[in-house]
Structures are given as C-alpha cells and as structure tokens.
Image (spheres, helix red, strand yellow):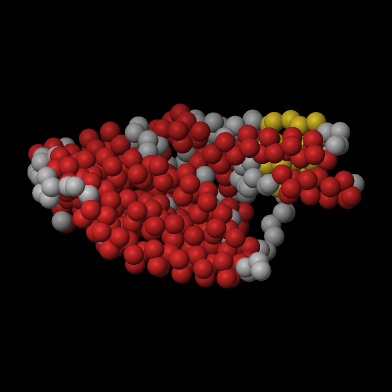
C-alpha cells in the first residue's frame, strides 16, 4: 500500500523524534566502549564531535523540512507583489522579513534583482531583501540553536533583520539609481504567469525535496565545521583568544569583519568554528560580527551582482552592510 | 521545436540541459536545444528564478529542475496546444 503524503510526513516526524530521543544514550554508550582515556585532549575532541555532529544534522533535517513547507507559501513573484507600492521604511521591513522565508539562491540574485527593479520596487527595498535572504537562513538558525541555544539564535535573527532593514533604508536614501547598469531599466520581462496553487500534499512534498536538496548539500560542511570545532575545543587552551578576539581588543570587531567579508563559507561550515572560538575567549559581539560578515557578505555574490550594479554601488552596498555589522558587534561587546 | 534552457551556468542549469536532451531523445522528436546564459536575455523572459525552460519562446517552467518525465510531459503538452 502506498502511503499518502500525510502519512509519510507523520512517519518522518515520528522517526525523527525517536532518533533524537535515542541520540544521547546512544552516543553515551558508544563513547563508553571507545578506548578513550577521560580528560585527555583527544578524548575531549572526539566526545565533542560525536555529541554535536549527529545532533546538528538531525536538527537540520527537521527544520529544513518545516521551512520547506513554509517556503512553499512564498515565491519571489508573490514577494514582489507584496512589496510593490510600499514606501521606503515599511518596504524595507517587509522585504527583510520576506527575505527570510522566500526561496532564494544566490545564483538567482540577478534575475531577482531585475524582476524587482522592473516592477518599480525601490532599490533600497530590493537591497533589504538581498541582504536578509542569504544572511538569515534556516541552516544558520539551526546551527545557532543547536550549538549556542535559542537566545543566541534569536539575537542573530533580530540583529540580522535590523541590519537588513537599516542598510537597505540607508542605500535607498543615497539615490544610487544611476549606479545600476543602464540596460536593467530597459528590460520588460514577459508575464510568465505560471504560478499555480499547490495542494497541501505538494507542500509536504516540497518539505521532503528541501530536505533532500539542502541536507545532502550541507552535511559535509557541518561535519568538517564541527570537526574543526572539536579540534579547537580539545586542543586550543582556554582564553587563548581573549587577547585578540576578546572585549579588551577594541580593534577586534572591524578586523573580524574585514577578514570575514572576503572569506566565503556557508553557515554550516563557519558556525561550529565560531562556537569553538567563543569557548576559547572570543567575545560574543566579535564572534557575531565575524559570522555575519562571512555568511551575509560573500565575494561570489558580489561578483554576481556586479553584472547589474556598477562598481560604486557594489562598494556602497558592501561598506554599508559591513558598517552595520561592526556597529552590532560593538553593541554586543558593550552589553555582554 | 526550439527549446531554450535559461540559466547563468550553475549546477541546476546544467542538470536541466542534460535532462532536456534526454527527454528529447526518449520522445524521438526533432528539437534543438539552446543554452541562454546572458542575464539580459534571461531576464527578458520575465523569470526571477533560474533555471528556466522555454519551448518555442514560451516559458514552461522556472525555478525548479523538472525530472526527465516531467520535461517529457511539458513537451507533449506544448505539442498538443500548438
């Protein structure tokens, strides 16, 4: 008998719950059978890896499934319609929030940009979307949730939103329309009108598809990231980083951002490493700034955007966002 | 029949091109497949997500990579409506 889509979803969630419940005792059993002398660096590193890696991959699976279903309610076409005719500030707020839930891949950044501009959505609003979409994604949230706890995850999402809203607003006020490649304004795309209204079954299928696509792509990064994190956890002495990435080093935040911008990694690879850095004396603001710079601003994406934006606007975009990230970094170093 | 695969050359676009060729082969039909990589041209079709599949200048799918069977169905559907 073939299972209906609902039954498949229930089965999937049920299996997930059982696996998650079995995880801790299972790993405890496994580590007790391994010939690891407790307290040694190697034992610490391996234990860390065995606990964290399967847990994060499991968390990722369930969140990606849920997000896949949620995303089936959104599309760039729909988002464009919602954003049409909104004024600057409200538009920036909406665009940033929609940036989180609208399916987006940086390879589609250019067609999306053109599609937005073509229907008259202000540049600043478009930028809010383009900043939020890569920076705040489910993979980042899962890793923060799994490794740091919900408070840090919430802080990351909230500050990411604030940066996307304000950076977009600032760019909108700078009147930079002349720095968009001229041909962009001449394009009149035909109306494709293929939007269909998926059934709930299709939406569940979208969840499974997202799991297959994203988890299969991301898990190697997570394993490598957690392995590096485990190594740092076991081998790097406590407080090793407090001198260079701690609060006392005032220059740590801008330097982290400067290093982070050209560095490109997805959230899956960088967050476990940042987690370990934090443990070794880096301050939250500095770590957060580094993470946001790596995930939110990437060289490949700016190169792609260069096709539609002239160089001055690329530089404005990167520096406005980087400034926002630096401010957030200092803010958190002051608060915590 | 003239089929265009719209996409700047990412992994998905290559997969779509491969599957389209497979679908044509399976269906034993006469068709040419062209890859459109220029953003200007891609955008003129009005899609905001790549890859896009265009049959005789009509967009039939975008933002997803349809399976070979689905591409066959799209081609057949297009043939009927012509």
Q: Is residue A290 above or below residue A32?
A: above
**Residue occupying image coordinates x 27% and y 48%:** A49
Q: Position of residue A38 (x, y in %)?
A: 12, 50
**Residue occupying image coordinates x 46% and y 69%:** A14
**Residue occupying image coordinates x 60% and y 33%:** B8
**Location of residue A174 (image quadrant):** top left
Residue A172 seen in the current view: no
Q: Is residue A138 left or right of residue B49?
A: left
B8 vs A303, nearest the viewer: B8
Q: Is residue A133 above or below residue A107?
A: below
> Where is the N terminus of chain B found, in terms of image quarters?
top right
Q: Position of residue B22 (x, y in %)?
A: 74, 37
Q: Is residue A256 left or right of residue A7?
A: left
Q: Position of residue B44 (x, y in %)?
A: 69, 39
**Residue occupying image coordinates x 55% and y 58%:** A208
B45 vs A89, nearest the viewer: B45
**Location of residue A230 (image quadrant):** top left
| Numbered label tally | 0
A107 vs A9, nearest the viewer: A9
Q: Is residue A248 left or right of residue A252?
A: left
B29 vs B10, nearest the viewer: B29
Q: Position of residue A51 (x, y in %)?
A: 27, 54
Residue A33 seen in the current view: yes
């Amino acid at each position: 008998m073939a299972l209906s889509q609902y039954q498949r979803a229930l089965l999937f969630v049920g299996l997930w719950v059982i696996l998650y419940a079995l995880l801790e005792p299972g790993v405890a059993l496994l580590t007790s059978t391994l010939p690891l002398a407790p307290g040694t660096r190697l034992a610490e590193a391996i234990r860390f890896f065995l606990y964290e890696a399967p847990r994060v991959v499991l968390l990722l699976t369930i969140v990606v499934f849920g997000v896949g279903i949620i995303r089936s309610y959104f599309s760039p076409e729909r988002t464009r319609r919602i954003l049409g005719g909104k004024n600057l500030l409200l538009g920036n707020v909406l665009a940033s929030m929609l940036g989180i839930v609208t399916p987006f891949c940086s390879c589609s950044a250019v067609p999306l940009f053109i599609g937005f501009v073509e229907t008259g959505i202000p540049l600043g609003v478009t930028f809010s979307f383009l900043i939020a979409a890569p920076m705040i994604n489910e993979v980042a949230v899962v890793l923060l949730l799994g490794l740091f706890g919900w408070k840090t995850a919430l802080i990351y999402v909230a500050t990411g939103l604030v940066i996307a809203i304000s950076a977009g607003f600032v760019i909108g006020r700078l009147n930079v329309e002349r720095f968009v490649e001229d041909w962009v304004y001449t394009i009149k795309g035909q109306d494709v009108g293929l939007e269909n209204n998926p059934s709930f079954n299709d939406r569940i299928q979208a969840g499974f598809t997202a799991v297959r696509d994203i988890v299969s792509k991301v898990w190697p990064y997570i394993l490598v990231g957690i392995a590096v994190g485990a190594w740092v956890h076991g081998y790097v002495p406590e407080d090793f980083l407090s001198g260079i990435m701690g609060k006392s080093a005032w220059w740590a935040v801008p330097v982290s951002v400067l290093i982070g911008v050209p560095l490109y990694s997805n959230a899956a690879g960088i967050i476990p490493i940042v987690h370990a850095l934090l443990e070794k004396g880096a301050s939250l603001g500095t770590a957060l700034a580094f993470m946001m710079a790596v995930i939110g601003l990437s060289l490949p994406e700016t190169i792609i955007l260069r096709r539609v934006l002239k160089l001055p606007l690329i530089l404005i975009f990167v520096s406005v966002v980087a400034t926002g990230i630096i401010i957030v970094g200092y803010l958190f170093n002051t608060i915590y | 029949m003239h089929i265009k695969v719209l996409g700047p050359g990412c992994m998905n676009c290559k997969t779509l091109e491969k599957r389209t060729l497979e679908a044509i082969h399976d269906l034993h039909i006469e068709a040419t497949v062209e890859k459109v990589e220029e953003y200007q041209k891609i955008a003129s079709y009005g899609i905001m997500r790549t890859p896009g599949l265009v049959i005789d200048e009509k967009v039939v799918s975008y933002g997803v990579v349809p399976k070979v069977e689905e591409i066959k169905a799209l081609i057949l559907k297009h043939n009927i409506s012509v």
